[in-house]
Image (cartoon, rainbow, N blue to C red):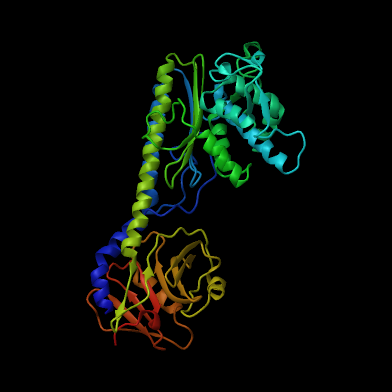
């Protein structure tokens, strides 16, 4: 029966091994403030998929570098992978005028104060606070506010925020600055560790601008601000969702300009004379990323806009490729990873071969089949990944003794273990011997069964466990006889 199963599933298992190579990277170095091919000084993991993914990441970094290099002006770029924190940085610590992109910070402080007000804090702005329109407060580029009826129109702070985000209404922004307080905006930014991002003046205050009181930031700080928003570092879950939804309002902007229709982008562009900026989160399924591109001294403002859109598209293509690869991987593992053993006309429990992300390294010494989760944890340490429950089978992934270990529990008791090298290279004969030795309690031993094609099997002397080493030589399965029920 085992031979039949392995024969039917050899191709599928090979495909799974290939897909497993795209599993996530375990270790990373600390971020470098300068641009590097990998944005964070490189990845420590040297698995096959790490090398493949690094190659694509380098291509993106190189492409961004080319766009920056040919730009006739000054450009800074920061791209942050929101799934693993990797960055691409090009002149990302240079201080630029933010133009209207600073409105992201104004919006965030409004939501922050609303949260504080509901918690009992006094003198805080709320989203539902009402504003009575006063035409004396109008400034240029206020398409919505200029059309309101004096003495009649009453709107909320949330409405003002919507005008500010959707059409970059400057009067709405200025009213919100008065209501939340410029100093409070800057204090919030400092609390997030952003030391260069500063709101210094209201919109259209040219006198302040001539005095050098410009609203400024860096591409890296804008991207980090968006990362903090995405991770919910300032707002509770409900408010954070509302914030992102409002910031995702469709608008004329550069990041989404060339992206496929329907892609959610939470962003705020900005423009001044010879200045173009855009900062936002692009919600690629399973692989969202934050980006900020800031330019100044642009000889051709249209070229600056096109460059931002081009960088956004290049980044989107990379993350979309990762997303599709991830979706395909899990679809494939679900399609052919749940395999069944048959015996006595009864279909047995499913065993799942699932992509693992291991972050836990534990002491050597493998579990014995039949132990509970606490006993397994005492041997391996805490699991690096909980792979969920499939039918009666609860799966946990570990690393121990240099091997990846997948443990299947049924009713809380271990029934099966799968062992492989972390890079999924073939297990050596010495590795197989080590796994078998560590899987044999004191007083037991393994006896190899007669050759079965290219597959190898063993039976433990207590007749409670069998081990199966498929011809692919990349996984060794140790499992409870009652769980697998091979034909007699």
Q: Quadrant of residue 318?
A: top left
Image location (x, y in percent) of residue 149: 60, 17
In this view, the residue in front, 61 or 385, is 385
| Percent x, y of residue 364 | 51, 70
Instruction: Examine the rendered structure and indicate whether residue 116 appears above or below residue 475.
Output: above
Q: Nearer the viewer, residue 30 or 334?
A: 334
Q: Nearer the viewer, residue 420 or 245?
A: 245
Spot occupied by residue 324 in the image (x, y as percentages of width and height): 35, 47
In this rendering, position of residue 384 left or right of residue 183: left
Query: In the rendered view, does 365 fall on the left or right side of 261?
Result: right
In the rendered image, the quadrant that contains the N terminus is: bottom left
The residue sitting at the front extreme is 152
Q: Please, is residue 346 above or below residue 43 in the view?
A: below
Residue at the limit of the structure toward the left, as seen here: 453
Residue 15 location (% of width, % of height): 29, 59
For the point 66% across and 22% down, the residue is 200
- Is residue 207 in view from this perspective? yes
Query: In the figure, 451 relative to 40: above or below?
Result: below
Residue at 46% across, 44% down: 42
Q: How many numbered circles does the render carry?
A: 0
Screen quadrant of the C terminus? bottom left
Q: Is residue 212 visible?
A: no
């Amino acid at each position: 029966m085992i031979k039949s199963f392995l024969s039917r599933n050899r191709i599928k298992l090979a495909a799974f091994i290939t897909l497993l190579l795209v599993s996530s990277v375990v270790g990373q170095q600390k971020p470098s403030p300068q641009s590097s091919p990998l944005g964070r000084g490189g990845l420590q993991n040297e698995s096959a998929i790490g090398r493949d993914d690094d190659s694509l990441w380098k291509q993106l970094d190189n492409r961004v570098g080319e766009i920056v290099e040919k730009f006739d002006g000054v450009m800074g770029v920061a791209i942050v992978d929101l799934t693993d924190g990797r960055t691409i940085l090009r002149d990302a610590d240079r201080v630029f005028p933010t133009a209207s992109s600073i409105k992201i910070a104004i919006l965030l402080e409004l939501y922050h104060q609303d949260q504080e007000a509901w918690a009992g804090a006094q003198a805080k702005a709320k989203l539902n606070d009402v504003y009575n329109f006063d035409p004396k407060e109008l400034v240029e580029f206020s398409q919505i506010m200029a059309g309101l009826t004096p003495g009649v129109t009453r709107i909320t702070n949330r409405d003002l925020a919507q005008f500010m985000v959707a059409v970059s209404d400057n009067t709405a922004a200025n009213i919100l600055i008065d209501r939340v307080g410029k100093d409070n905006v800057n204090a919030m930014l400092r609390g997030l560790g952003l030391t260069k991002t500063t709101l210094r003046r209201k919109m259209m205050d040219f006198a302040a601008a001539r005095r050098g009181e410009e609203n400024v930031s860096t591409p890296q700080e804008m991207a980090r601000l968006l990362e903090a928003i995405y991770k919910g570092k300032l707002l509770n879950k409900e408010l954070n969702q509302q914030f992102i939804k409002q910031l995702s309002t469709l608008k004329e902007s550069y990041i989404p300009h060339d992206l496929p229709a329907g892609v959610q982008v939470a962003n705020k562009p900005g423009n001044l004379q010879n200045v173009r900026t855009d900062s936002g989160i692009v919600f690629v399924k399973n692989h969202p990323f934050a980006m900020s591109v800031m330019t100044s001294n642009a000889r051709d403002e249209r070229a600056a806009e096109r460059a931002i859109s081009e960088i956004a598209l290049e980044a989107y293509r990379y993350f979309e490729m990762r997303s599709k690869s991830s979706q395909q991987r899990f679809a494939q593992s679900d399609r052919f990873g749940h395999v069944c053993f048959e015996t006595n006309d009864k279909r047995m429990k499913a065993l799942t071969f699932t992509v693992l992300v291991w972050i836990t390294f534990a002491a050597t010494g493998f579990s014995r089949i039949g132990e509970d989760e606490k006993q397994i944890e005492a041997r391996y340490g805490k699991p690096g990944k909980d792979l969920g429950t499939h039918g009666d089978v609860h799966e946990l992934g570990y690393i121990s003794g240099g091997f990846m270990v997948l443990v299947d529990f049924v009713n809380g008791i271990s029934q099966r273990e799968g062992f492989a090298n972390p890079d999924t290279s073939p297990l050596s004969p010495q590795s197989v011997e080590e796994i078998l030795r560590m899987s044999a309690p004191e007083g037991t031993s393994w006896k190899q069964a007669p050759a079965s094609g290219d597959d190898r099997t063993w039976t433990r002397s207590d007749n409670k466990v069998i081990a199966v080493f498929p011809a692919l030589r990349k996984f060794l399965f140790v499992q409870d006889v009652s769980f697998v029920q091979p034909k007699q």
